Each structure stands twice: as C-alpha cells, then as structure tokens.
Image (cartoon, rainbow, N blue to C red):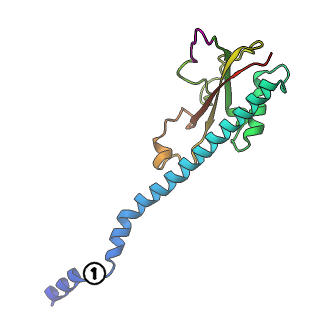
C-alpha cells in the first residue's frame, strides 16, 4: 500500500510547471528590471545631451550674458527637464582649446560625489571671440533599481549614484 502510493506520487505530473516557473521567473524579472533601468539611463543621458546642446547654442549666439558656472548650469537644467536634482547634481567643465595644439580634457569627468566633501569646480573659463571651447557636463543620478540586474552592475560612487556625462565643443562668436 505504501509502495503503491509512493509510486503514484512519483509519477504524478500535476504542478510540474511550478518548478519551471520558480526557476525562470527570477531570470525574466531581472531582464525586465534591467530593461527599465537601461531605458531610464538612456532617457536621462538623452535629456542631458539635449540640455547641453541647447545651452551651447544660447552661448554661441550670445543669449547668455557673462556666462558663469551657475548660469550655464541652470540653463542646462531648464532645457533638460527630467533630470532629478539637476541643480544639486550637475557639474560643468569648460575651457578654451587650441585646435593647433589640442590637449583633451582629463579622462575622468569632474562630477559631484555627495558622499565626499564639496570640492570646487575643476575648470570653467569663458573664452574670447573665435576661440574653440570644450564643455563637459556630468550629472550623478540614483539607479531606479540599485540592487537588481543592471542597477547592481554599473559603477557607483560612495553615495550609490551613477555618473552620466556629455561633452561638446563650440566656437565663441566674435
């Protein structure tokens, strides 16, 4: 009797799909959450580039008088729109570059790390007329899902934020 019940229980296939579901669901969930994370990062990167491009256009045309780090940063945040805590998380570098003796910006972008003491802006120099300028913007954002999939794999600072940056070049109008 026990042997018959045991044999019947071992041959019973009811609920077999639960095992497959239990194995595959976490994998599919990780892919879905990683897709959302990648979409949000791409959206924020695109908005940062849009804000930077539109602000540089204003700089080239002289719509921003006496550009300072704060004025340019506020203009980028206005144009970018959907960047969380933009005013507190965005940092800019701008410097003139000689096209005949090009020296690039430092490899590491100058970003704000909220877990460390505040440091001054690395370089923000207004160039003269017909001078080639290079500007880099860096913003720190918090991942949507910081402990799952892509949000867990990206490089984060001490505060758990991810750096997004964009670089552009323009020539000052005379």
- In x, y percent, where is residue 159? 57, 35
Q: Compared to 129, does 59 lie above or below?
A: below
Q: Main secondary structure of the magenta part?
A: loop
Q: Is residue 160 left or right of residue 122?
A: left
Residue 43 seen in this snapshot: yes
Residue 102 colored in magenta in the image: yes
- In the image, residue 104 lies in the stretch drawn in magenta: yes
**Region rendered in magenta:** 99-105
* Residue neighbourhood size for the residue with mark 1, other residues' Cα within 10 Å, grouped as few (<14), some (14–19), many (≥20): few
> Picture quarter containing residue 94?
top right
Residue located 37% across and 63% down the image:
24
- Residue position marked by numbered label 1 in the rendering: 13
Position of residue 26 measured from the top left corner of the image (x, y, whole percent): 42, 60
SS at badge 1: loop
| Residue at horizontal 59 percent and vertical 30 percent from the top | 115
Position in image of residue 7 (x %, y %): 17, 84
């Amino acid at each position: 009797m026990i042997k018959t019940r045991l044999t019947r229980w071992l041959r019973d296939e009811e609920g077999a799909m639960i095992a497959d579901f239990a194995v595959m669901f976490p994998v599919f969930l990780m892919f879905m959450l990683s897709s959302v994370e990648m979409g949000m990062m791409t959206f924020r990167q695109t908005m940062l580039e849009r804000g930077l491009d539109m602000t540089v256009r204003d700089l080239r045309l002289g719509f921003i008088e006496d550009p300072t780090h704060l004025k340019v940063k506020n203009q980028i945040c206005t144009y970018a729109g959907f960047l969380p805590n933009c005013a507190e998380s965005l940092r800019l570098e701008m410097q003139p570059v000689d096209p005949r003796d090009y020296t690039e910006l430092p490899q590491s972008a100058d970003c704000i790390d909220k877990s460390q003491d505040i440091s001054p802006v690395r370089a923000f120099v207004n160039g003269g007329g017909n001078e080639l300028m290079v500007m880099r913007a860096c913003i720190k954002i918090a991942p949507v899902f910081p402990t799952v999939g892509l949000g867990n794999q990206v490089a984060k600072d001490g505060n758990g934020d991810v750096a997004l940056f964009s670089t552009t070049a323009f020539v000052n109008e005379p």
